[in-house]
Image (cartoon, rainbow, N blue to C red):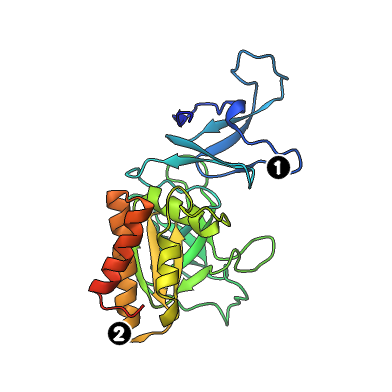
Amino acid sequence: MSSPLILLPGDEVPSEHLPSHDSAPLRLGPGLRLLSQPSTSPAPTDASTHVLSATQAGILSTDPKRNAVSILSFPNRRYVPTTNDLVIAQIHHSSPDYFHCMITPQTPQAVLGQLSFEGASKKTRPMLKQGDLVYARVLSTGLGPGAEIELTCVNPATGKAEPGGLGPLTGGMVFDLSIGMAARLMRAGSSTSDNEDGVEGLVVLEELGRKLEKIGGFELAVGRNGKVWVDCANGGESAVKATVAIGRCLNTIDERNLQPADQRKLVSKLLREMKVET
């Protein structure tokens, strides 16, 4: 098994580490950018060769099935907003045209247009107040230090709340995770793999879904900024207990880096302790 490739900001991604699909364009994930400049590789290249450069430190991750590549940041790293990231933001205050949102305590406030919601008009726009939560996409981060971060709750090309679930988050609870764990959860949620050990050994979502199916399951929204929103569908006391149990499961797996077998044991243990019917 080859050793993982660790990159620092500014490092080029060696071409031999990239997935190759002639029929599909390469998808760039967080931590990478495309540069139109000569490669520093000693191999002869055309003057207009495109190269990939790391914008943050981390481990190179490739997904041959999706022809995708990204940087897995280290778990304790602070979140740096990147265009197209999905985030859970909290409303701080509003102005005539914008909601001003907190993404993390370390980043400047982001702006979210009051009409940046599916079907929104001046009469139908959501009336959000301080403390409310939204699931949004980073539309732009501007240039230079102190640049304004802009969010949106729609796909600019379609005007729809894609990829689904964008917009206000009502009910439920929010839990803090490392940004590394948040990234793993997002990949696990989007994977169609039948591997019994899940994506990167993460089976907790599948196990929780199976255990909680009897009480109506649960909804999950994961932000790249290290936030996860959890809501159980059936309401009532059992839903509150299940929601707390899910949050505790995710936090414990994040802190202890549990393997698949231990994740399954933890799910059963916490649901039993919270007296959640399964």
Seen as rendered, the residue at the extreme left is 273
Sequence-first tag of 1 and 2? 1
Determine if residue 220 is in view.
yes
Q: Name the side, left or right, on which 81 lies relative to 52.
A: left
Q: Secondary structure at mark 1?
A: loop
Q: Residue at x 30, y 78 (%)?
A: 276
Q: Residues within 10 Å of mark 2 (few under 14, many from 20)?
A: few
Is 265 or 133 nearer to us in this picture?
265
| Contact check, label 1 and label 2, Cβ < 8 Å | no
Residue 168 x, y percent position in the rendering: 47, 73
From this view, report whether residue 28 is shown above or below residue 111.
above
Determine if residue 133 is in view.
no
Q: Secondary structure at mark 2?
A: helix
Seen as rendered, the residue at the extreme bottom is 236
User: What's under tag 1, amino acid-wise?
Assistant: Pro
Marking on residue 268? none
Q: Residues within 10 Å of mark 1 (few under 14, many from 20)?
A: few
Residue 78 x, y percent position in the rendering: 35, 45
Q: Name the side, left or right, on which 112 lies relative to 107.
A: right
Q: CA distance from mark 1 to mark 2?
A: 48 Å
Is 9 or 69 nearer to us in this picture?
69
Q: Residue at x 45, y 41 (%)?
A: 72
User: What's under tag 2, amino acid-wise?
Assistant: Glu
**Quadrant location of the C terminus?**
bottom left
Q: Residue at x 31, y 61 (%)?
A: 265
Labels in figure, total: 2
Residue 273 x, y percent position in the rendering: 23, 72
**Which label sits in the foreground, 1 or 2?**
2
Residue under numbered circle 2: 237
Residue under numbered circle 1: 25
Residue 130 x, y percent position in the rendering: 36, 72
Q: Residue at x 65, y 14 (%)?
A: 43
